[in-house]
Image: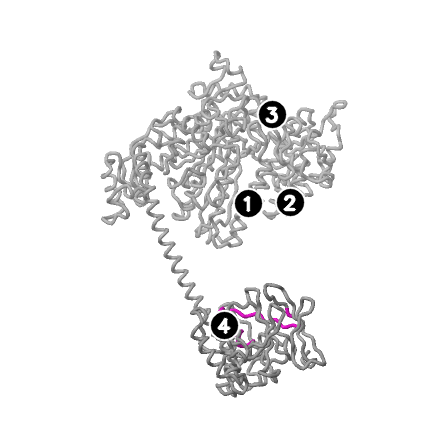
Amino acid sequence: MAMQREAGVQDFVLLDQVNMEKFMDNLRKRFQVGSIYTYIGEVCVSMNPYRQMNIYGPETIRKYKGRELFENAPHVFAIADAAYRVLKQRQQDTCILISGESGAGKTEASKIIMKYIAAVTNAQGQNEIERVKNVLIQSNAILETFGNAKTNRNDNSSRFGKYMDIEFDYKADPVGGIITNYLLEKSRVVQQQPGERNFHSFYQLLRGANDNELRQYDLQKETGKYHYLNQGSMDILTEKSDYKGTCNAFKTLGFTADEVHTIWRTIAAILHLGNVEFQTIEDELVISNKQHLQSTAKLLQVTESELSQALTKRVIAAGGNVMQKDHNATQAEYGKDALAKAIYDRLFTWIISRINRAILFRGSKNQARFNSVIGVLDIYGFEIFDSNSFEQFCINYCNEKLQQLFIELVLKQEQEEYQREGIEWTNIDYFNNKIICDLIEQPHKGIIAILDEACLSVGNVTDDTLLGAMDKNLSKHPHYTSRQLKPTDKELKHREDFRITHYAGDVIYNIKGFIEKNKDTLYQDFKRLLHNSKDINMSEMWPEGAQDIKKTTKRPLTAGTLFQKSMADLVVTLLKKEPFYVRCIKPNDIKSSTVFDEERVQHQVRYLGLLENVRVRRAGFVNRQRYDKFLLRYKMISQYTWPNFRAGSDRDGVRVLIEEKGFAQDVKYGHTKIFIRSPRTLFALEQQRNEMIPHIVTLLQKQVRGWIARRNYKKIKAAVTIMRAYKTYKLRSYVQELANRFRNAKQTRDYGKSIQWPQPPLAGRKAEAKLHRIFDFWRANMILRKYPRSEWPQLRLQIIAVTALAGRRPYWGQQRKWLGDYLANSMDNSGYEAYSTNVRKLKSSTPSGELFRQVLFSAFAKKFNKHNKQAERAFIITDTTIHKLDGIKKKFRDMNHTIAIKDLTSISVTPGRDQLIVFHSPDNNDLVFALQGETSTLKEDRIGEVVGIVCKKYYDATNTELRVNVGSNIACRLGEKPKTIVVEGAANVETPNFRHASGNIIFEVPSSYCV
């Protein structure tokens, strides 16, 4: 049990002192912090919180499912689960007894229990089981509509007692049930106290039904127009939505349209019947307002004349003769009210029987042998009003019987548990209220017997006569008195009141109406009338109306005797089951979620016998737990039992732990449980446990985090392996598809260039580029096979050139052999020896940063400079630089104008046959050359060769492509000044020449050079 000392103790048994002051103090503390549930052993005390609380959701249900009472904070779910576990594990019938006064939350508690049982059953989702659960839950809506009413203490007070048996099969799934009702407060139908209302059903019909339905029933929405409603409160609650909910519940439970129509038609008939008025004209009793009579007859489906005759006359059969007797106005009013009460009572009983048909177990008798039940008793609590009548007398008698049963069962359970566990039993002193039960129910001597005798007496027997008979027979009883017996007790009215000292306190009853309510007389004329109704359902409610009028029948049992018998049957039923208890308390009468009314709460604690319950429970041992559960909870506080005890049984482990902690004198060892005598020992154990919990939590967190990390690592590793295998598979599939597509590529003209590549998988996107490269190498190899390897360098340069020019210059020397260093060739250069000598000098004298290994290209050129002059020059292209040389006349002298290839920004050429080329320098002084021969123009195009060599070396140095510009107008910079070279074709020009014109450079070429 997780102790929360700041909110009191969670079990009243653990109080250090058992008295009313300590009990109330603990109850108050817990209510103020929102802890509405507290235990007394296995009894749950429930405080009405008067607000919505978030403690009933699926998460809370999972928390309490299958757990022991002490493992979680007190909750009504724990009681429901304990009852369910006993049924499931032991196949033993159980029951949950819910008691408390009106407004204490009994009905809500029963609904919460039903919700819990529905939630923890039917794990397989079987339709029939789900249907039974829905019927059990939906039946509450119908029972509240027809059995609940607004009182001064509660807007939804149950005005009847309800006992529901929920039947479970051998798998502990709900398969059926049956509802039994006790003592419906039918007097409320015809009369209500100020501030109270009639049953909800009347208001739901008037305020929830649509206009068409109300017209069918001849009704109007105003409740004040009906006598049976306008005596009490006219408060509006949630009738509109409740009416829809009730109608939906009828559908869920399988009520037919005719049955539902009968129910609402009967409710309407009662309203009209209440408005029927009687008038005496010339000594004859007549009904003055025929309209309501007609409506009542129509709705009950009887004739107007028959109904009128039954209300104003009475048929008497005596000695085989039948005669008719007229009523006076008083008798007629009494008969009308009696009929209204009887109709509603029969309707309510019929609705419950109809619900029982819907939830009745549908299996065979052989299957039913293995079924078990959980009974839920939701019955009225002890009632003390300003004026207490016959109904309160019966209700309080019921509570006396249940209190007697409660004490007997608690003592019986205690004694049986002691015997099972081999613990010595000691007698417990307690108040036995059998003397009060005998006062009410003892044959021939009790109040019910005296009341029945008065009802059977011939002659004018009044309530006053009854009180005199009770005084005479009960004058010496210590729990009974009246003003006649105690003339000085002015609290009692003379010849009206008598007092019974109940276990919960003194209650003064007013004798008026006892005889009439006990007789509960309903003339046979009404029974015959309604049995002959054309409404089959209405006729079914009155089977005794079929008897012959002349047939002699036994006098029916009185209401008191019937109630006494039903209580006796209930006690017999409950004695066969293992009981669990929910005691409901209301904290105040103003429905406040914060007010704790000491006087009201103490009154309820007293009449619920809660203090007596604590004393009975405390008389022996305050706590008992199974050895395995005890060891599991406290093993961490002992070095000998943590983490596991392996030196014997659980009992041995518990003994070792208790003796180590020094509590051996305060415990007893049973066969399966340890019994702890005082709360101090339990608190000490809990305190030591609470001190250890943080360390254990840290240890567990460490272990769990390590386990989670290892598990995640294994998952990741497995995922990586799977992904790797999957990628390999997809890649293999892709490569296989490529192989299939390119199987015959070698035989195609373009060696597979036109074959469409398949879309690569995600895992093969990186490999696709490599595969393309492999294919390109293979295809290139296939193409190059027909060329000698000696020609491959030229082919490589030609490919670079054609790629750089990109089709923008049709003529670039692709048809000839590229020699490169033309100036070293005697055929092209008559001064080749001087050239070779100067190149060697240049190679040896070049700074280390401009070293070159070989000359890749050389040629004569006409150069245009920044002074707007052209000159005969030569230039060489090495593997790193471009060098400008003087002409042949000056023996190719180095002119110290060099551009590193890697520093070039771009190359510009024209689209024609001319040999103009511009090397764009980063220092804004570009090299402008027009290639030519030694003495004449070139007969062949060498521009492509220059572009190929320079672009290749630029890429080798920078790993980027050099931009090549192609155009008839070329922008350049000479001496940091911008210039534009314009190519012009002229018919009379044979040798290309540069000239300066208007700030531009004109390059004149033969017209045949232009494109």
**Residue corresponding to mark 3:** 193
> How many angstroms separate mark 3 from mark 1 (CA)?
32 Å
Looking at the image, which residue sits at the far right? 282
> How many angstroms separate mark 4 from mark 1 (CA)?
108 Å
Mark 4 or mark 2, which is nearer to you?
A: 4
**Residue corresponding to mark 4:** 881
The three-letter code of the residue at mark 4 reads Thr
Sequence-wise, which precedes: disc 3 or disc 2? 3
> Magenta includes 951?
yes
Magenta residue span: 947-970
Front one among 914 and 367: 914
Q: In this image, 515 relative to 120: left or right?
A: right
Question: How far across and how far down the image is residue 799, in percent?
Answer: 55, 79
Question: How far across and how far down the image is residue 482, in percent?
Answer: 49, 17
Q: Residue at x 43, y 21 (%)?
A: 479
Mark 3 or mark 2, which is nearer to you?
A: 3
